[in-house]
Amino acid sequence: MKPRDKKTEVSKLEGILKACIGNKVRFRVDGIVTFTNEILKDYIIGDSDITIVMEQESITTNNYNEVSFTHYEDRVDFWIYGDRTSRFNLQFA
């Protein structure tokens, strides 16, 4: 299996996030077992960090080294790996 290209994966993530601003998002981060429900407001993608901005909270993953996806009919699940692992379920509508 060919290794994933970080730039390509981050570009895909940016496209998904841009299209889904205002949609429901569920997330959890390392050490927290339960998901939190929120609304996606914005995102910030830097050279070494990704911040997902929601109504009540922002989640930043520093020194990210991988982004991965699983696509479903009604949502996309994505993981951001770096100084901690963040998992998000982003609804398409």
Image (spheres, rainbow, N blue to C red):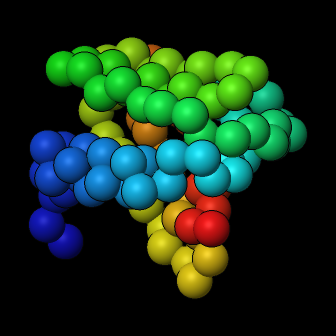
Quarter of the image holding residue 83? top left
The residue sitting at 69% across, 20% down in the picture is 57
Depth check: give the residue in front, 70 or 18: 18
Q: Answer yes or no: is residue 45 visible.
A: yes
Count up the numbered dots. 0
Task: Examine the rendered structure and indicate whether residue 56 appears above or below residue 17.
Answer: above
The residue sitting at 45% across, 24% down in the picture is 51
* Quarter containing the N terminus: bottom left
**Residue extending furthest bottom?**
73
Left or right: residue 38 versus residue 87 is right
Residue 29 picture location, percent across and down: 66, 30
Task: Examine the rendered structure and indicate whether residue 74 appears above or below residue 18.
Answer: below
**Residue extending furthest front?**
22
Q: Answer yes or no: is residue 87 visible.
A: no
* Quarter containing the C terminus: bottom right
Residue 75 picture location, percent across and down: 59, 69
The residue sitting at 67% across, 48% down in the picture is 25
Left or right: residue 70 versus residue 40 is left
Residue 10 picture location, percent across and down: 25, 44
Quarter of the image holding residue 43? top left
The residue sitting at 79% across, 29% down in the picture is 32
Residue 35 picture location, percent across and down: 81, 42
Task: Examine the rendered structure and indicate whether residue 65 appears above or below residue 83.
Answer: below
